[in-house]
């Protein structure tokens, strides 16, 4: 999204992708230059090819952005130092939380951030966390951009016919990878507690991942398989979220929490764990949602109950959602990135030419 929105009169972005894989491959903007290094999923044996491709792309670039922690950051840094190009580390996660489970490449990459010319964090929490961990110069903060108007257009589209029954009752929606970080098991437990209180509703979990079987088993254990719906990955989740009553996020940690901002853009109030970092900054004192302590399923249940049962309060929160989402609209974020990239481009140094003879 960021690359596609850069002013093409000033910037000529190239997206270098290590693997041609995943459901978003076919959704890349048609006017964006994309170079895939490897066909199919990345494998360990692809590392050398990825390094060569990064070095080749860096040679013809004025600025390099390491867009993911880990392998991409390490390779980008190597290529930038080789060709004497400025390089940006783009940090998307809370290092204190993510570092406990990260692989060695991610740990190395974050430790190397001091060697980058600039470091950009997607939230103030991520920036402060890294500064506490490593010291040095505090990262800049540029929130992840969302296109509020585009989300609104997507939200107006129809859902699949076979998914219509989901919306026969009020819906609590959530979207994200099914993994330990996203922690959807707490949502299933809160859903079961709400059902036990007699609050009639459905829980819709949008996504896929290695915790799918465990989550389905948890729903079965709690006797709520008939009211928990797994939609798998959706090309347009906004249409589903917009038709929901409440959006919920149960993550143990985040970097920003893009789905929270997008839910607001779709006009849906949010209940979220106040996890490090992101949701607290997105919701702040906007009145567009509620924050509860991480892991407190009882508080999560209570807040969801209030929004499900209190229509005037829900309407008040809904009236504030889109206005709050515009604080993260693409215009501001893209402008800040353009300023940063332009300033760094002036630092690119040509390689020294060996003396003749």
Image (tube, helix red, strand yellow):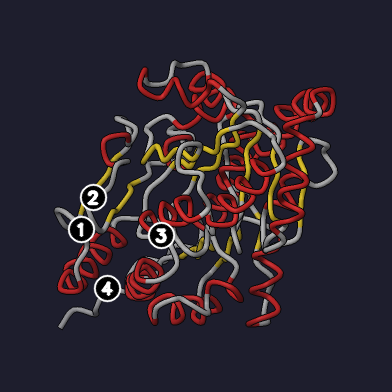
Q: Disc 2 vs disc 3: which is toward the camera?
A: 3
Disc on the earlier residue, 2 or 3: 2
- Tag 3, which secondary structure? helix
**227 is higher (above) or lower (below) than 45:** above
Q: Disc 4 vs disc 1: which is toward the camera?
A: 1
Q: Is residue 263 visible?
A: yes
Q: Report how many numbered discs are placed on residues in the image.
A: 4
Residue underneath mark 3: 214
Residue 307 rendering spot, x and y as whole percentages: 76, 34
**Which quadrant is the N terminus positioned in?**
top left
**6 is higher (above) or lower (below) than 20:** above
Disc on the earlier residue, 1 or 2: 2
What's the mark number on residue 353?
Answer: 4
Q: Is residue 67 visible?
A: no
Of residues 40 and 169, the one nearer the viewer is: 169
What's the mark number on residue 238?
Answer: none
Disc on the earlier residue, 4 or 3: 3
Q: Disc 3 vs disc 1: which is toward the camera?
A: 3
Residue drawn at the location 52% of the way across and 63% of the way down: 181
Residue underneath mark 2: 21
Q: Is residue 191 left or right of residue 327?
A: left
């Amino acid at each position: 999204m960021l690359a596609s929105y850069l002013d093409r009169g000033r910037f000529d972005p190239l997206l270098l992708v290590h693997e041609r894989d995943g459901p978003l491959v076919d959704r890349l903007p048609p006017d964006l230059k994309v170079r895939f290094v490897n066909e199919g999923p990345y494998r360990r044996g692809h590392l050398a090819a990825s390094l060569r491709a990064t070095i080749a792309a860096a040679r013809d670039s004025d600025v390099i952005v390491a867009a993911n922690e880990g392998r991409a950051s390490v390779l980008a840094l190597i290529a930038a130092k080789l060709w004497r190009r400025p390089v940006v580390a783009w940090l998307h996660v809370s290092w204190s939380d993510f570092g406990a489970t990260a692989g060695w490449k991610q740990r190395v990459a974050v430790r190397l951030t001091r060697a980058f010319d600039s470091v950009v964090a997607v939230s103030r929490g991520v920036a402060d966390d890294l500064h506490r961990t490593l010291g040095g110069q505090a990262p800049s903060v540029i929130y992840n951009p969302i296109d509020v108007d585009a989300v609104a257009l997507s939200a107006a589209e129809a859902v699949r016919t076979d998914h219509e029954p989901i919306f026969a009752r009020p819906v609590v929606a959530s979207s994200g990878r099914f993994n330990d970080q996203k922690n959807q098991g707490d949502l299933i437990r809160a859903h079961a507690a709400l059902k036990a209180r007699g609050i009639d509703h459905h829980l819709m979990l949008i996504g896929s991942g290695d915790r799918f079987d465990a989550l389905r088993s948890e729903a079965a254990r709690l006797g709520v398989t008939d009211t928990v719906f797994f939609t798998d990955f959706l090309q347009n989740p906004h249409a589903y979220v917009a038709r929901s009553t409440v959006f919920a996020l149960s993550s143990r940690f985040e970097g920003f929490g893009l789905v929270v901002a997008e839910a607001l853009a779709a006009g849906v109030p949010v209940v979220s764990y106040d996890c490090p970092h992101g949701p607290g900054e997105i919701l702040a004192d906007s009145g567009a949602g509620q924050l509860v302590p991480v892991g407190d399923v009882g508080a999560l249940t209570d807040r969801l109950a209030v929004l499900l049962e209190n229509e005037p309060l829900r309407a008040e929160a809904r009236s504030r959602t889109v206005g709050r989402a515009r604080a993260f609209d693409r215009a501001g974020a893209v402008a800040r990135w353009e300023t940063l990239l332009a300033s760094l481009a002036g630092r690119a140094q040509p390689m020294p030419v060996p003396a003749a003879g």
